[in-house]
Amino acid sequence: MKFPWTLMKNLKLSRWNFVQNDCEQNWQFTLRKLVFNLSGYNKYGLYTHDIIYYDDPVVREALRRIPEEVLDARNFRHIRAIQLSFLKIYLPREKWVTYEQDIEYRYLGPYMEEIQTEQAEINEFDYHNYRDSD
């Protein structure tokens, strides 16, 4: 995939990050990091799993299963982000969440995988927990 160098120049990206060589992962990592930084939620101190769609049943069940202190930290980050957004300011730059920190702190991942495997097992054996009235 060829990248227009004028686009990278306008975005102030270094040319060596997008060199077309054996290592495709270098430009993919740089592109993911760019998208993460342009999304803007890291400036409020939020992680990727803090902004996952809440109405999804898998996410709702995962939030029910996580430890209370992790849920409290998540709620604190939400309240802080809402307050900062209301005041139209960002956190100081040293408190922004970096891409590397975000990758390391994906706290809902194991719970969502567990729930999805449980759902796959339920569907495989065609077992559904019916209520008494059904």
Image (spheres, rainbow, N blue to C red):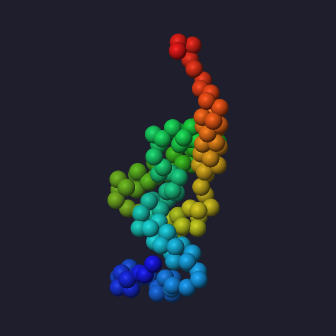
Could you tell me residue 123's position as x and y percent?
A: 60, 34
Q: How many marks?
A: 0
Position of residue 30 in the picture relative to residue 5 (left or right): right
Could you tell me residue 124's position as x and y percent?
A: 63, 36
| Residue 123 in sight in this render | yes
| Residue 60, placed above or below residue 85 | above
Position of residue 67 in the picture relative to residue 99 (left or right): right
- The residue drawn where x is 35% and y is 85% is 6
- The residue drawn where x is 52% and y is 64% is 97
Q: Quadrant of the N terminus?
A: bottom left
Could you tell me residue 134's position as x and y percent?
A: 52, 15
In front of the other: 47 or 88: 47
| Residue 91, placed above or below residue 54 | below
- The residue drawn where x is 60% and y is 51% is 109
In front of the other: 68 or 132: 132
Could you tell me residue 64's position as x and y percent?
A: 58, 37
| Residue 66 in sight in this render | no
| Residue 9, placed above or below residue 120 | below
- The residue drawn where x is 62% and y is 27% is 127
In front of the other: 1 or 66: 1
In front of the other: 83 or 102: 102
